[in-house]
Image: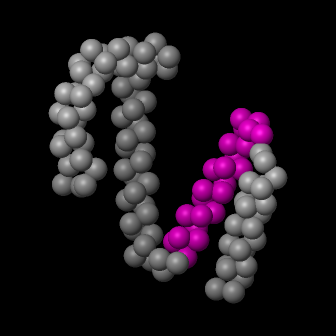
Amino acid sequence: MPARMLSLLILTPFAIAVEGPQMWAAGWQKAISRISPHFVWWVTAQGVIYHLYNQVSYMSLDEISPLAFSTINTMKRISVIVSSIIIFHTPVQPINALGAAIAILVTFLYFQVA
């Protein structure tokens, strides 16, 4: 059984005991009212997509070195940050832009050398 599933099974009773069933019911209703009646479908789809992402990651580790995988993962994170800045018009501090530029440059240099 994957560790995340085991954690879910072990920690759910404690979460219910600490927060109480009323808090869970209120949170569920709030989520449904804010997102849509298709809340369960969206949560299920997100879980399936995340599971597939993990499967592809493990399959990729069999084909490439851990260092190359880590470098590609870094570029994935940078692309998510840049796309969210473009799509959501997130303000960026100069120090954050400098950090992203350095990460992109180092990744580019790594792939040129490798």
Q: Percent position (x, y) of residue 63? A: 45, 77
Magenta span covers which residues? Answer: 68-91
| Colour scheme of the picture | one colour
Decide: is 56 above or below 63. Answer: above
Height in image: 108 above or below 14?
A: below
Residue at 40%, 36% (x, y): give it: 45
Q: Quadrant of residue 56?
A: bottom left
Please state which of residues 110 and 49 is positioned toward the viewer in this rendering.
110
**Is residue 60 one of those drawn in magenta?**
no
* Residue 70 shown in magenta: yes
**What residue occupies the far right of the structure in this picture?**
94
Name the residue rendered at 31%, 18% in the picture.
23
Which residue is at 71% across, 35% downward? 88
Kindly indicate the quadrant of the structure image that contains residue 60.
bottom left
> Chief secondary structure of the magenta span?
helix
* Image spot of residue 34 (x, y percent): 50, 16
* Nearer-the-camera pick, 43 or 14: 14
Q: Is residue 23 left or right of residue 17?
A: right
Q: Look at 24% across and 47% down and name the residue there.
A: 7
Residue 16 percent across, percent down from the top left:
22, 27
The quarter of the image holding the C terminus is bottom right
